[in-house]
Image (spheres, rainbow, N blue to C red):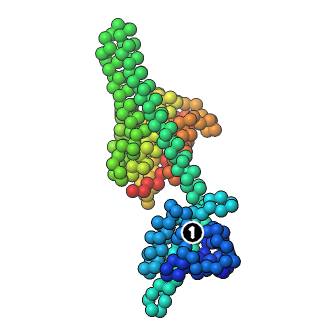
Amino acid sequence: MLDATPDCIKLLGADGNLAMMNRTGCIALNVDEHGPFGMPWIPLLPEDIQAAGRAALARAAAGQSARFPGRSETDAGTLFWDNLLTPMIGQDGEVHQILCVSRDVTSQTVLERELEDAVAREHLLAREMHHRIKNLFSLVAGLVFIADRETGGDGSSALALNLHEKLRALSRASDVAFVGAESLPAGQPVDLGNLVRALLAPYGERCEIVEQAATVPPGVVTTLALVFHEYATNSIKYGALGTAGGRVTVRWTESDGVLAFTWIETGAAIEVPDEDRQGFGTQMVERMVRAAGGRISRLWRPEGLIADLYLPIRH
């Protein structure tokens, strides 16, 4: 027997049969630690893991280090392993034995799966919000024409048409925000300037964009779009875009794979809100940013919000 350690350690012959194994390995594979060894190792693995195990074993038998993810069922529940196979080569240049060290990565694996589930739920919620918002835009656009006719117009007054065009622009921005990366070809980077301009187009010249050439991978498009959609919505309700003469400046830089955005509002006259009271939309985008490895900081001033967004981008 090998000395007991937290890792699962196995010594295999070049043919893949077990020569020695520590107590942790015996428990993981449900093998009697006092019994004889010599049995094939691969059949002891769960059926859905065996193909990856055979491929890794073949590479190790050919003289190359190999690894694969594993799983075992014990009385304590399901354990997940990172298996590293290292060939032991003799003076004749042949592989005589293979050392397999399996590190317990259960906590990390469970956390990663919980995070994936959380992100999936956020995306499902975003799709539902998109559907409802599109319906709302259609409803409001219809009400604009009805109201114009009820006040003596024919639905084509300058005010009605102008408002209808702004609603259409908002609808297009909503498409960018909520559909985002799902509609893009796999792996195709997105021009950041085009994305931000599409999101802020409904607000016209009141939004100034200070650009730096950059592209972002499809995986972060939805997150970025939701952030700016939320900022713009809140600015109309509480900040500069809801104040005559108020303006917004957006700028960004990219360095060492981290995108740094700054959203600056000026010309507003607002009551500084309580930071502990955040709306549902703000909480949702903050969770999505954290899930993507980023962070948001905000500074509320009477003349408007300053927000900084830091987001890692990996092409």
Percent position of residue 233, x then y: 47, 32
- The answer to whether 14 is drawn above or below residue 307 in the figure is below
Q: Dot 1, how many residues are within 10 Å of its Cα: few (below 14), some (14-19), or many (20+)? A: some
Q: Residue at x 52, y 42 (%)?
A: 122
Percent position of residue 199, x then y: 39, 38
Residue 201 seen in the figure: yes
Q: Dot 1 corresponds to which residue?
A: 44
Q: Residue at x 69, y 77 (%)?
A: 34
Percent position of residue 270, x then y: 55, 30
Question: Could you say which is closer to the camera, residue 244 or residue 195?
Answer: 195
Question: Could you say which is closer to the camera, residue 226 or residue 64?
Answer: 64
Q: Residue at x 45, y 87 (%)?
A: 94
- The answer to whether 103 is drawn above or below residue 182 in the figure is below
Q: Residue at x 52, y 53 (%)?
A: 293
**Farthest bottom residue in view:** 91
Question: Could you say which is closer to the camera, residue 33 or residue 264?
Answer: 33
Residue type at numbered disc 1: Leu
Percent position of residue 259, x then y: 44, 52
Quadrant in the rendering for residue 209: top left
